[in-house]
Amino acid sequence: MAWPRKILKYGLLLTFFGILLAAGIGVGTYLHFRSEIPSIDNLKDIQLQVPLRVYSGDGKLIAQYGEKRRYPARYDEIPKQMVNAFLAAEDQHFFTHHGIDPLGLMRAAVTLITTGEKRQGGSTITMQVARNFYLTRQRTFTRKIREIILALHIEQELTKEEILELYLNKIYLGHRAYGIKAAAEVYYGKPLDELDLAQIAMIAGLPKAPSRYNPITNPERALQRRNYVIRRMQELGYISQQEADQALQAPVTASLHAADVEVEAPYLAEMVRDHMLQTYGDEAYTGGFKVYTTVPSELQEAANSALRKALVSYDRRHGWRGAEAHLEPLPQSKAERDALLAKHPAIADLLPALVVKVDKKEAEVYAGKAGTITLTWKGLSWARPYIDVNHRGPKPKSAGDILKTGDLVRIQRWQGQEGEPYWRLAQVPEVSGALVSLNPRDGAILALTGGYDFYSSKFNRATQARRQPGSGFKAIIYSAALDAGFTAASMINDAPVVIKDDGSGDSWRPENYSGKFFGPTRLRLALTKSRNLVSIRLLRSMGIEHTLEHARRFGFDPEQLPHGLSLALGSGEVTPLQMARAYAVLANGGYLIEPWFIRRIERNGEALFEARPLVAGDCEEDTKQECRPAPRTLDAENRYIMYSMMQDVITRGTGWRARKLGRKDLAGKTGTTNQQRDAWFNGYNQHIVTIAWVGFDDNRELGKGEVGGKVALPAWMEFMKVALKEIPDDPPRMPDSLVTARIDKSTGLRVSGRRKNTMFEVFRPGNEPPMMEEEPGNDVFETRDSTGKKAREEVSADELF
């Protein structure tokens, strides 16, 4: 009996010393590696790499930048079944262990000993968090020890829910998707709470091997892995047998989904991206910034549509340039045709299509996902052949005059005036354009598009294209004239001008667009009819230096403008955005504002930046933020008279087409440069300024008759039709410091009320023209005060002079 007791005694001693030895080894190992283990103090405040997202003013997504697609989700946002699916797939004992799973580690050790392979890591979710945030993916024993120690520390610092939230937001799930929220969007285009059980299980199966079990690149293996997760969920009691059976029968529905861009504003988005990169460096792409712009989505969409319609309209007026390509023999299979069309992506709303059949008055085209489409004669008959910018060929008599089987063309879904949409033959416009609109009170950009299609040409013509403004610059010239003492009734001779160059001996003989001369002309009428020769004589009379300095009041740098008489015809180079800023001075009462487009920058719900723009007029109207008053650069009298004159451009001048909008508060100026290389319309009221420009990037001629009022004004009108819907018709009030007097239209002199061919004109007091000579006897003439009420004065003829 003694030997058994001795064996038991020594056995217990050996066990005790073994435990002490193991504990010592464990403590020693811990102390050895503890100094190498990173601190986890910042784990609660960890900043995940989240892409830059750009939003419209009304919170719709414009763009997303960054290699990693990640949208962090709070634990309370994660569906219970999603949590259960990941526990079933990765760590069923997660809520009961303390960071490590001893049985799992033992299984991994046995597998290593028996097979020599590291196939089972025994890693818990907490250990994966430790590895993903702090360690490399190198598979070594020392890394595994560090992983275990870190997991134990994490369990002491964070709750289970906090650990699981970090894990589900950090893990890579394939196709640049990091975290479950991104995966739901990438594979299913849905938010988390709209996923069904089969889709949840598919995502939960991805962490083991995101490439091998990916439903896009390897759907068969992905299906096997998904079904494994579903069965495990049923075995663990997370779902019923019926739910499991139903999910197991579900097909694989995953497909790649891009970020759900809600507003097409790529030119603006690129401006934001560039600003963020300049401000935050590469962190801009990973820091989780949300940038809210000033642009309302409705106005941006209106700008896109308006510019494209104007460019297409110009392009069609000049004829059909032919198919983009011709293929012989014609591809017969759908796969071949789809592969061919894939090489020619859609450009804006212009879809690539293959002509498969041509009849007398119609053609049949294959357009990929849009299917087989019949182009009727209504959609074909416009296509007279292009010869040059001023000539087209004869009208086509049949579809065969336009197309051949095997032609690769563009088609467009068009909304006809009758209200019935139809498909029509189209082509990518060679002409370019830009449209920019801003709030004149504070400079907030309301819409901006820099071309027909950003992905075909990233050149932003709204901010980067420096073009001659043509007659659009006359607004600055005439404002300078008023500042120099001229009035809207001042007479300038519209007669030939010859300017000699003393150096070369050449002469410059500018002309009006019509080629005609009209003699002495009032400034108001000259601006309304855009008379070039009046502008040149006016500039020469008041002096170039005065005019250049006056241009500074509109935001132009005199050093960047011509220092010769060609300045009167807008020969300088400006961008559409610069013109918008300049015209805002006339719209807002005479204040120089700064255009801006970023209203707020956020990260993690905290505002990092709030815009504080310069504001025109009374700062007391701004109650939301501390106001920064914009400098007044133009007096109220000058501004009002200019506004009044430019209203006439629309009511009876070169911008007459805009009368169709049916408003009294609109003002503006057309602009057309020499040989019709640039076409502009610069228009506004007191609440919005919009600039439209059309021209070729290589500065080619637009063609005869292609002037600002015909080419650019339609884009302006199409946009303003939407932009003005909620804006009251609000003409400016005449300042009390101005008076009106009746003048003779032919001479600009003040006259009595009994004469014909007269009108009321606005003047600064003391700056009225002299009285026109009358026949002897008492006469009556009228003036009006700032309220428009008549002020009658009876004077004798002797007192008029």
Image (cartoon, rainbow, N blue to C red):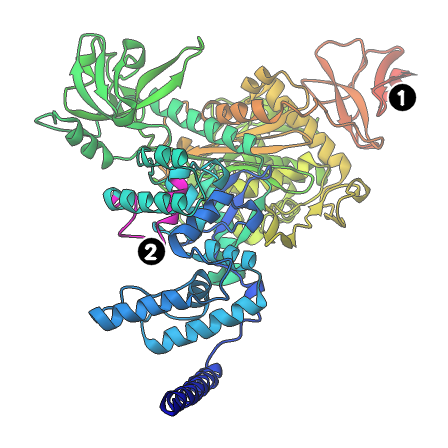
Left or right, 690 with respect to 226, comes to: right
> SS at mark 2?
loop
Query: Callout 1, which amino acid?
Result: Glu
Quadrant for the N terminus in the image: bottom left
Range drawn in magenta: 199-218
Q: Residue at x 49, y 51 (%)?
A: 52
> Which residue sits at x=42%, y=65%?
101
Residue topped by disc 2: 208
Residue at (46% x, 24% y) in the render = 515
Q: Position of residue 81 (x, y in %)?
A: 47, 43
Q: Say whether disc 2 or disc 1 marks the residue closer to the N-terminus.
A: 2
Q: Is residue 776 above or below residue 731?
A: above
- Taking 673 as reference, is 318 above or below it? above
What is the x, y in percent for residue 331?
12, 27
Residue under numbered circle 1: 799
Q: Residues within 10 Å of mark 1 (few under 14, many from 20)?
A: few
How far is the residue under mark 2 from the one under mark 1?
A: 102 Å
Q: Nearer the viewer, residue 455 or 595?
A: 455
Residue 393 appears in the figure: yes
What residue do we see at 9% from left, 27% from top? 328
Quarter of the image with the C terminus is top right
Q: Is residue 306 left or right of residue 703?
A: right
